[in-house]
Amino acid sequence: MNLLSLLALLGFAAAVVAVRDSPSACSAFKPTNITNVALTNLPTYFSANASVNISNEYSSIDVSNLPAFCRVELTITTNTTAGSFALTEVWLPDDWNGRVLTLGNGGLAGGVTVAELGYVAVPQGFAGISTNTGHDGDVDDGSWAGPHNDNAIVDWGWRAMHLSVVAGKEVVQQYYSTPANKSYYLGCSNASPSLKEVQEFPEDFDGVIVGSPANWQTHLRGWSIHMNLNTQPSTSPHFMTEDIWDNVLAPEVLRQCDSLDGLVDGIISDPRDCAFRPETLTCSPGQNKSTCLTPDQISALHRIYAPYYEANQTFVFGGYFPGGETKFYHGLVGKKQSKPTKAYFQFMVTNNTDWTIHDYNATLLQLTDELDVGQSNAINPNIIGFVGSQHNGKLIQYVGWADQLISPNNSIYYYETVHEWTRANTNLDIDDFYRLFTVPGMNHCHGGFAANAFGGVQQASNNNPPLSLDPQHNILAAIVKWVEDGIAPDNFTAVNYNSNDVANGVGFTRPLCRYPSNLRYKSGDPNSASSFECVFDS
Ligand SMILES: *[C@@H]1O[C@H](CO)[C@@H](O)[C@H](O)[C@H]1NC(C)=O
Ligand SMILES: *[C@@H]1O[C@H](CO)[C@@H](O)[C@H](O)[C@H]1NC(C)=O
Ligand SMILES: *[C@@H]1O[C@H](CO)[C@@H](O)[C@H](O)[C@H]1NC(C)=O
Ligand SMILES: *[C@@H]1O[C@H](CO)[C@@H](O)[C@H](O)[C@H]1NC(C)=O
Ligand SMILES: *[C@@H]1O[C@H](CO)[C@@H](O)[C@H](O)[C@H]1NC(C)=O
Ligand SMILES: *[C@@H]1O[C@H](CO)[C@@H](O)[C@H](O)[C@H]1NC(C)=O
Ligand SMILES: *[C@@H]1O[C@H](CO)[C@@H](O)[C@H](O)[C@H]1NC(C)=O
Ligand SMILES: *[C@@H]1O[C@H](CO)[C@@H](O)[C@H](O)[C@H]1NC(C)=O
Ligand SMILES: *[C@@H]1O[C@H](CO)[C@@H](O)[C@H](O)[C@H]1NC(C)=O
Ligand SMILES: *[C@@H]1O[C@H](CO)[C@@H](O)[C@H](O)[C@H]1NC(C)=O
Ligand SMILES: *[C@@H]1O[C@H](CO)[C@@H](O)[C@H](O)[C@H]1NC(C)=O
């Protein structure tokens, strides 16, 4: 037995790291005996503060302030018959905290999230894992899926993620000569593969944080079209210009609802309280149409803010909530939502590149559900394998109330279906393993006029790091505390930086409340989180 394995055996993990000659250990590292896993390139060592300038079609990072780490690039064969594969990276910090953190992707993304590996995992001491999900491409591109590229579709749906976690943990164990103590996940948007793992591969993670997950892909895509049809095309009578969204609708929503939380500050703390009535903007005879709404536009708004039921009975998806109007135009009319949605139907569902959103109908929605291409729906309410006493996993979810790409109601809906199932089938209390936090004013995953920085993905990498790395301010530290110390988070303190950039200094702090509680202003300095409370009564 050599010195390293002796020390590891004795539990001297820190000592192992200290005596390791990291640069040469890194470049000589070769994973052995991991089925279907090979090195893509020789591992690269980055010493502390070295330039880390890496990019792919989905994600990029260009910094020189990271602690030392070893970058291992893997090719994972996902189906040997087909020769399909995923590219996955494992970033191994010298100063390792004994934990693994898998970082998720967004949209149809095909690229390792190098930004989050560098901004989140490595600086906090986690060995980081991320995969390209089985193809290269940006968030909106779906052409890789067709025609009939079934293996790539299922890799994107869940398989690349699962295989990457299994292989990544093995790489971690071989590199440090000791297994990781705990395995975590942090992702937002296309966080659906992680919920799939919670539902089907409970051993993969001990703690999971999902932001606004696209876990009901079949319905999300149908809803996106429904929302597009309610706003487009620009020649239709219900079309509203960006100017109307920003300068007519947004101020009226605030006029009607901003004060409901006790403070007029441009943020609607609980949009469930806001019964927005667009009728107040009805054009009077002769009024300039750029400053008011026509009956067609008002009807469209009612559909946009309402849950979507197909044929008046089947619940498809939740509606928008008032408060995100300045981003809704981009979500609905801009390519953000329509492009990946069109790609999903063209390249995965209908396999017809001439298909347009005007070809959408109830029959197609039903077919989409039946196909569930790539098995990407992760909607099973039974998560006992993960959260039950056998495994004791913890799940934290968050969602911005002003999400412009996935109705916040989708997060509530999944939480409620798990809640209901658990109550009906077990004696467990959902609070002991699954908590949902809502973020007033935050758009999809980040941004918006909001206290929107709390350690989620796409935050630090967009100049919005958490105020501190402690569990009250940093959701990643909170899940570690819950999993390892059994102390669950009640609320978070999120920060807003002026113009959403840490360089401009702190604007204000706010609590993030645990669903179903509501944020209310008490009294005192409105810029301080301590002037607010979370109220459970409505
Ligand atoms: C390789 O892995 C297999 C299956 O896990 C195991 O049985 C075998 O002993 C391993 N071989 C080496 C050389 O570690
Ligand atoms: C890296 O940069 C930080 C901050 O400037 C500094 O404190 C630290 O000593 C540097 N480390 C190395 C190894 O250069
Ligand atoms: C990072 O790489 C890009 C592309 O190669 C280059 O344009 C950029 O200048 C590099 N950044 C630094 C800090 O060198
Ligand atoms: C692997 O790919 C082959 C060839 O495309 C296919 O027939 C088979 O069903 C795939 N297996 C799995 C498990 O996806
Ligand atoms: C794993 O946890 C144990 C117990 O807390 C600790 O002694 C050990 O150092 C940890 N291992 C690593 C690799 O950090
Ligand atoms: C389109 O292609 C996908 C992937 O091969 C397949 O699962 C699906 O059934 C096809 N759709 C139709 C309508 O045939
Ligand atoms: C109508 O209002 C818009 C926006 O306020 C303004 O740009 C435009 O000049 C107005 N048109 C007329 C005819 O007054
Ligand atoms: C849905 O209900 C409305 C109001 O009752 C009715 O006007 C409409 O025709 C119904 N649509 C469908 C598809 O059933
Ligand atoms: C949210 O979803 C629930 C179903 O869970 C539905 O009853 C409710 O009307 C939805 N609200 C909105 C605004 O979408
Ligand atoms: C529904 O849409 C599909 C594909 O877009 C089309 O083939 C079908 O004919 C449509 N069905 C109805 C009833 O319009
Ligand atoms: C946050 O949780 C802590 C601990 O339970 C509690 O003392 C505090 O009042 C909570 N803050 C809010 C705003 O609810």
Image (cartoon, helix red, strand yellow):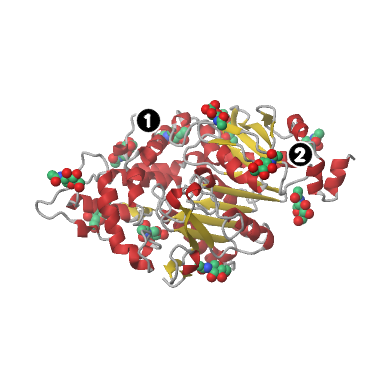
The residue beneath circle 1 is: 352
Does the beta carbon at disc 2 come under 8 Å from ligand 1? no
Q: Position of residue 295 (x, y in %)?
A: 18, 53
Give the residue drawn at x 38%, y 41%.
337
Mark 2 Cα-neighbour bin, 10 Å: few <14, some 14–19, many ≥20: some
Q: Residue furthest left?
A: 286
Numbered mark located on residue 174 in the image: 2
Q: Is residue 160 above or below residue 509?
A: above
Q: Position of residue 218 (x, y in %)?
A: 43, 45
- Tag 1: amino acid: Asn
Is residue 68 among what the camera can see?
A: no
Where does ligand 7 appear, by image quarter?
top left
Query: Which callout, 1 or 2, points at the residue further toward the start of the chain?
Result: 2
- Tag 2: amino acid: Gln
Give the residue drawn at x 42%, y 32%.
347
Give the residue drawn at x 62%, y 54%.
207
Numbered mark located on residue 476 in the image: none
Q: Front-most of 196 and 125?
A: 125
Q: Residue furthest right?
A: 1
Left/right of residue 435 with respect to residue 450 in the rendered view: right
Mark 1 Cα-neighbour bin, 10 Å: few <14, some 14–19, many ≥20: some
Give the residue drawn at x 9%, y 51%.
286
Does the beta carbon at disc 1 come under 8 Å from ligand 10? yes
Q: Position of residue 365 (x, y in %)?
A: 37, 44
Q: Is residue 320 above or below residue 30?
A: below
Q: Determine the CA span between mark 1 and mark 2.
A: 46 Å
Instruction: Say what secondary structure mark 2 lies in.
Output: helix
Q: Position of residue 57 (x, y in %)?
A: 50, 31
Instruction: Say what secondary structure mark 1 lies in.
Output: loop
* Picture quarter with the N terminus: top right
